[in-house]
């Protein structure tokens, strides 16, 4: 039921206090009308005496005496249909590509519905991103949430665009779609994403939601929820495999802190609200698979760690909720290696469920474990060489240093448009392992060595 009030008592930053509203619901949509102009807002807090509303377009010019608050009796919704594929929207779900409003099949609540844990299907299918450091060493599994932890100056935007254009589910007849949400990005970054999607043709199977840095902060809170509402529709009603990429979650959390400060809430760690863990979980936990449904949502949230501090509340809380992380390294970036993925710091907790016979290849797990061990030893030997000099290394140590160098240059490094199959990735891994004596291959069965390794050394 629509109700109108002319009882605004206070305007404070993006927040408006409306008195005499005793029946407002949390998240209810509100329109503010002033001289024919309409601005939208959402109820943040309600009591039997007043409602606290956050305004998406900002409160500049709103005057308590002349502004009418219209409570619409419903929350924020997004009109969905398959015609949203190939479209670009702003952070509040309005078309941003100059095309008309897409045909609407139905309207869905952007907050979605929580998935019953009993109804969840365990993630167990390989998603190929075409990037060896991910596919080979930190495999993404359908229904997983695997964040990318980046730092200032690192190419996470380029990596996100490459994953979006290359990702696919192998040996599957179901359709694959990408939902991309960008929060607090610059105009140049927005153009980069749009041009990247159009150049690769990925735009045809994608839905983009772009919130720019000069857009209202409040809008940033709604953007990932609009994106996930679209993802849930495509996955669970249209039986698609959906990859949801959310960047940058740090900008989202900064907006959350700004709103919390405006509400005069007691701050938590580093000024972030105490409920940030719960808020992030309400986004991340919308990924997954449901029993009896063909579709799925796989999430890749991307965040830049403030001051490159992995103990900062944003990466720290994200790590508790998600199933692993992909770390980008400034050391590899300084060596001009793209993508600069640090495989030793990265982890995919669900990797073993999505690889092996029937998923990728029977030798995948063994190859990944052996490469991981060899690269770790090579890096240790490289550090020893820096401290004590090359004379302190044994011949085997020198071989492992060469392995580490080649691994970074040939396995991790690849072109921005290079889309490697899992077979190509594993072949590169075997080629590198052929550098080592057979006696060092302690994590791989002899049958795999005899079957896959070129030029085995005795």
Image (spheres, rainbow, N blue to C red):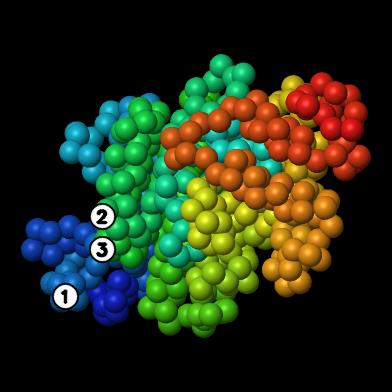
**Of residues 189 and 414, which is closer to you in this image?**
414
Residue located 69% across and 42% down the image: 137
Q: Position of residue 369 (x, y in %)?
A: 79, 43
Q: Are marks 1 and 3 in contact (CB under 8 Å)?
A: no
Q: Earlier in the sequence, mark 1 or mark 2?
A: 1
- In the displayed structure, does residue 246 sit left or right of residue 321? left
Q: Is residue 235 above or below residue 78?
A: above
Q: Earlier in the sequence, mark 1 or mark 3?
A: 1
Disc 3 on helix, strand or loop? loop
* Residue denoted by label 2: 187
Q: Residues within 10 Å of mark 3 (few under 14, many from 20)?
A: few
User: Is residue 8 in view from this perspective?
Assistant: yes
* Residue denoted by label 1: 63
Q: Earlier in the sequence, mark 3 or mark 2?
A: 2
Q: Residues within 10 Å of mark 1 (few under 14, many from 20)?
A: some
Q: Are marks 3 and 2 in contact (CB under 8 Å)?
A: yes
Disc 1 on helix, strand or loop? loop
Residue located 43% across and 82% down the image: 264
* Residue denoted by label 3: 214
**Of residues 88 and 359, which is closer to you in this image?**
359
Q: CA distance from mark 1 to mark 2?
A: 31 Å
- In the displayed structure, does residue 292 sit left or right of residue 165? right
Q: CA distance from mark 3 to mark 2?
A: 9 Å
Residue located 45% across and 73% down the image: 257
Q: Is residue 302 above or below residue 106?
A: below
Q: Is residue 151 above or below residue 87?
A: below
Residue located 73% across and 72% down the image: 387
């Amino acid at each position: 039921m629509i109700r109108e009030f002319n009882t605004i008592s206070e305007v404070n930053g993006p927040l408006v206090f409306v008195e005499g509203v005793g029946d407002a619901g949390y998240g209810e949509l509100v329109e503010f009308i002033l001289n024919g102009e309409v601005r939208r807002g959402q109820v943040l807090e309600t009591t039997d005496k007043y409602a606290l509303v956050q305004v998406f377009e900002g409160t500049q010019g709103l005057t308590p005496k002349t502004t009418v608050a219209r409570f619409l009796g419903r929350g924020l919704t997004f009109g969905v249909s398959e015609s949203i594929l190939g479209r670009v929207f702003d952070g509040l779900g309005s078309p941003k590509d100059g095309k008309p409003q897409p045909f609407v099949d139905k309207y869905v609540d952007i907050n979605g519905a929580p998935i019953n844990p009993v109804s969840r299907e365990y993630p167990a299918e390989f998603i190929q991103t075409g990037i060896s450091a991910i596919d080979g060493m930190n495999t993404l599994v359908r229904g997983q949430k695997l964040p990318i932890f980046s730092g200032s100056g690192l190419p996470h935007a380029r990596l996100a665009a490459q994953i979006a254009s290359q990702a696919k589910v192998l040996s599957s007849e179901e359709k694959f779609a990408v939902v991309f949400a960008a929060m607090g990005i610059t105009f140049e970054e927005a153009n980069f994403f749009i041009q990247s999607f159009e150049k690769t043709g990925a735009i045809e199977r994608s839905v983009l939601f772009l919130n720019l840095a000069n857009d209202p902060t409040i809008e940033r809170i709604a953007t990932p929820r609009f994106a996930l509402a679209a993802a849930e529709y495509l996955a669970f009603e249209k039986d698609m495999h959906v990859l949801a990429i959310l960047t940058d979650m740090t900008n989202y959390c900064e907006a959350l802190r700004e709103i919390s400060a405006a509400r005069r809430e007691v701050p938590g760690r580093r000024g972030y609200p105490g409920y940030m863990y719960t808020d992030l979980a309400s986004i991340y936990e919308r990924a997954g698979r449901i029993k009896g449904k063909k579709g799925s949502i796989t999430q890749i949230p991307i965040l830049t760690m403030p001051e490159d501090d992995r103990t900062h509340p944003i990466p720290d809380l994200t790590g508790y909720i998600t199933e692993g992380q992909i770390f980008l390294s400034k050391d590899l970036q300084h060596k001009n290696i793209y993508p600069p993925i640090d495989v030793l710091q990265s982890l995919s907790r669900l990797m073993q469920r999505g690889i092996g016979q029937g998923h990728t290849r029977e030798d995948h797990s063994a190859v990944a474990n052996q490469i991981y061990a060899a690269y770790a030893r090579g890096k240790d030997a490289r550090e020893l060489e820096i401290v004590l000099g090359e004379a302190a290394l044994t011949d085997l140590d020198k071989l492992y240093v060469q392995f580490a160098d080649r691994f970074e240059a040939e396995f991790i490094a690849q072109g921005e448009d290079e889309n490697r199959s899992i077979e190509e990735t594993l072949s590169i891994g075997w080629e590198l392992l052929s550098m080592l004596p057979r006696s060092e291959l302690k994590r791989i069965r002899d049958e795999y060595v005899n079957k896959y390794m070129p030029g085995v050394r005795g």
